[in-house]
């Protein structure tokens, strides 16, 4: 009885929309719907006029349970002469025994809603005095994910349900106990063109049948319009029954509050936020592809994460946007241009919105292998040759290592962390290698140079015996020096005087290793045998005056590796 009265009240509310064509209801239900099976709409809320005890027969509008304590409904449902009772867990009004009744202790209408019959911003939230206990017939529903516009593209199958009248006005309302459901497609705004400027696409969704026949109607207002989420198939909310020109009239499909566009109002009011940024974004680069992975954000904002969005940028331009499900937290981005540098960012989204983007970085990548230049010899400086690195944050770390011949027992050379290293005696016989490490947020990458040849001893000339004056006569002194290289090496030799000059006083030379190679201007032509001690005979002009002098002879040796060493021999001769 009371229910009929309230239905008339709501009819007055839409009274501005005079039906153009009288409806010809063909279906027996919602206008052309069907009985809902029990618990098939566990998130639907029944709004009833206050009674003690609360009575679902006082139903006047519908709503959706979007949180254990919050109902989303149409704002035009909130202008009631009495407080609102909410029932959850009802399908059949005649069998509401197991349902949960709550009082509404706060009504939050969209701030842009004006109750003038224009139905703009026709959305409101009802706060329940106690949270609903969730179970098989009482469940919450989320708004469609912000990234999932495909779920409600025109043509998408949708569903609406309500306890509203089953016959179109102007015929008298006929209510049935069974919740009525209707399968209907989302339509384009153009399908609601007959409404003219009263249809505001940013605030309203057009859904149903241009030919009429099936529709939501008075008493269904505020109730859920759902679609299936892409991929998961989960039912999500896109609309709340709002208004229309009559019901099921040809050319005038049903109009629903555009919930995706009221997402901020809805979730902002109930205190659900978008998730924080994903953590630990990382990238493994492949050929023309990248595997981007991340960890879940610290805060989900109060709703499960539904999607992650991965954006690839190069040179400041967005190259691709990929939306991936909540698990696994990884995706392969393909179609990248080899050689181009990409930056990836990942953001998490829940029903409330898309969170901040977290940058995913590739670990540092070397453009080549480092090497140590040049010959590894005690006392001779090795220089690190390090190719450029990509994506290194901060300076590269350099470590020199001494290794066994099989490169198994490498150890860090203490303190050798600069771009150069001068091998010491302890390094002799062991190759040296260079470890270069670069780090960034994604971690660190290490490259190892090819090892040097085993470190050689210092190249030097040693005496094998004391020098002997072989001959000293007027005009010429011939001295024999016993010497060899250490380590033994095949070498060439130059003989200089103590002033570093070649021509004088040396006039001619030399007998080396028993042979007499040609020597001009002090430079030895030919090579010395590395197995022999050398017997260098130096002849230089002198005048035998009978005085004893110390003569300095400088021998400079150069080996095959281009190392030179020199040694000064002092010989006492009687001139
Ligand atoms: C109403 O007044 C109402 N045909 C609901 C839906 C439609 C019209 C009116 C759509 O509750």
Image: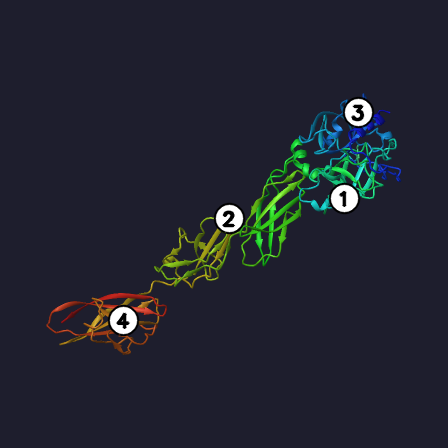
Spatial CA span between label 4 and label 1: 101 Å
Q: Nearer the viewer, residue 24 or 482?
A: 24
Q: Nearer the viewer, residue 184 or 417?
A: 184
Helix, strand or loop for disc 3 = strand
Q: Nearer the viewer, mark 3 or mark 4?
A: 3
Residue picked out by circle 4: 494
- Dividing the picture into quarters, in which one does residue 174 lie? top right
User: Is residue 30 visible to the viewer in this orientation of the structure?
Assistant: yes
Mark 2: few/some/many CA within 10 Å (<14, 14-19, 20+): some
Comes first in the chain, label 3 or label 4: 3
Residue picked out by circle 2: 440
Mark 3: few/some/many CA within 10 Å (<14, 14-19, 20+): many
Residue picked out by circle 1: 191
Spatial CA span between label 3 and label 2: 62 Å
Comes first in the chain, label 2 or label 4: 2
Spatial CA span between label 2 and label 4: 54 Å
Q: Nearer the viewer, mark 2 or mark 1?
A: 1
Give residue 428's position: percent from left, percent from top: 39, 60
Q: Is residue 261 above or below residue 58?
A: below
Q: Nearer the viewer, residue 394 or 20?
A: 20
Name the residue: 40% across, 53% down.
Answer: 418
Outermost residue toward the top? 52
Residue picked out by circle 3: 49
């Amino acid at each position: 009885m009371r229910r009929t009265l309230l239905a008339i009240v709501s009819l007055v509310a839409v009274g501005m929309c005079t039906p153009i064509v009288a409806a010809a209801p063909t279906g027996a239900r919602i206008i052309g719907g069907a009985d809902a099976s029990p618990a098939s709409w566990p998130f639907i809320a029944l709004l009833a006029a206050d009674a003690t005890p609360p009575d679902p027969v006082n139903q006047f509008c519908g709503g959706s349970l979007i949180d254990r304590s919050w109902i989303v409904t149409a704002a035009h449902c909130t202008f009631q002469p009495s407080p609102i009772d909410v029932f959850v867990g009802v399908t059949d009004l005649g069998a509401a025994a197991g349902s949960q009744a709550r009082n509404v202790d706060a009504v939050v209408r969209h701030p842009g809603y004006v109750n003038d019959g224009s139905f703009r911003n026709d959305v409101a939230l009802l706060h329940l005095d106690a949270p609903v206990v969730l179970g098989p017939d009482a469940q919450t529903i989320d708004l469609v994910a912000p990234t999932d516009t495909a779920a409600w593209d025109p043509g998408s199958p949708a569903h609406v349900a309500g306890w509203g009248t089953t016959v179109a006005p102007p015929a008298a309302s006929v209510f049935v106990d069974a919740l009525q459901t209707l399968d209907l497609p989302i339509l384009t705004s153009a399908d609601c063109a007959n409404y003219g400027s009263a249809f505001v696409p940013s605030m309203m969704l057009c859904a149903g049948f241009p030919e009429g026949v099936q529709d939501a109607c008075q008493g269904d207002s505020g109730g859920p319009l759902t679609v299936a989420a892409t991929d998961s198939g989960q039912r999500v909310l896109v609309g709340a029954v709002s208004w229309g020109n009559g019901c099921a009239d040809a050319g005038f499909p049903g109009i629903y509050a555009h919930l995706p566009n009221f997402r901020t109002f809805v979730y902002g009011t109930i205190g659900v936020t978008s998730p924080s940024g994903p953590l630990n974004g990382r990238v493994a680069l492949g050929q023309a592809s990248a595997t981007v992975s991340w960890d879940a954000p610290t805060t989900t904002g109060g709703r499960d994460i539904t999607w992650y969005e991965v954006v690839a940028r190069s040179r400041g331009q967005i190259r691709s946007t990929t939306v991936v499900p909540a698990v696994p937290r990884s995706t392969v981005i393909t179609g990248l241009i080899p050689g181009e540098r990409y930056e990836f960012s990942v953001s998490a989204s829940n029903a409330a919105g898309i969170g901040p983007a977290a940058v995913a970085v590739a670990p540092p990548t070397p453009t080549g292998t480092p090497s140590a230049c040049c010959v590894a010899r005690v006392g001779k400086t090795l220089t690190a040759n390090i190719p450029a690195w990509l994506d290194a944050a901060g300076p590269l770390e350099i470590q020199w290592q001494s290794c066994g011949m099989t490169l198994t027992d490498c150890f860090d050379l203490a303190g050798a962390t600069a771009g150069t290293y001068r091998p010491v005696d302890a390094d002799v016989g062991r190759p040296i290698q260079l470890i270069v490490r670069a780090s960034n947020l994604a971690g660190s990458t290490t490259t190892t140079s090819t090892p040097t040849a085993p470190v050689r001893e210092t190249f030097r000339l040693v005496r094998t015996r004391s020098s002997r004056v072989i001959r000293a006569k007027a005009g010429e002194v011939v001295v024999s020096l016993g010497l060899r290289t250490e380590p033994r090496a095949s070498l060439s030799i130059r003989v200089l005087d103590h002033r570093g000059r070649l021509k004088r006083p040396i006039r001619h030379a030399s007998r080396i290793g028993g042979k007499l190679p040609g020597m001009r201007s002090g430079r030895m032509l030919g090579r010395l045998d590395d197995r022999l001690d050398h017997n260098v005979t130096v002849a230089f002009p002198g005048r035998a005056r009978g005085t004893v002098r110390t003569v300095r002879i400088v021998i400079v040796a150069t080996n095959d590796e281009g190392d030179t060493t020199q040694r000064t021999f002092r010989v006492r001769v009687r001139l």
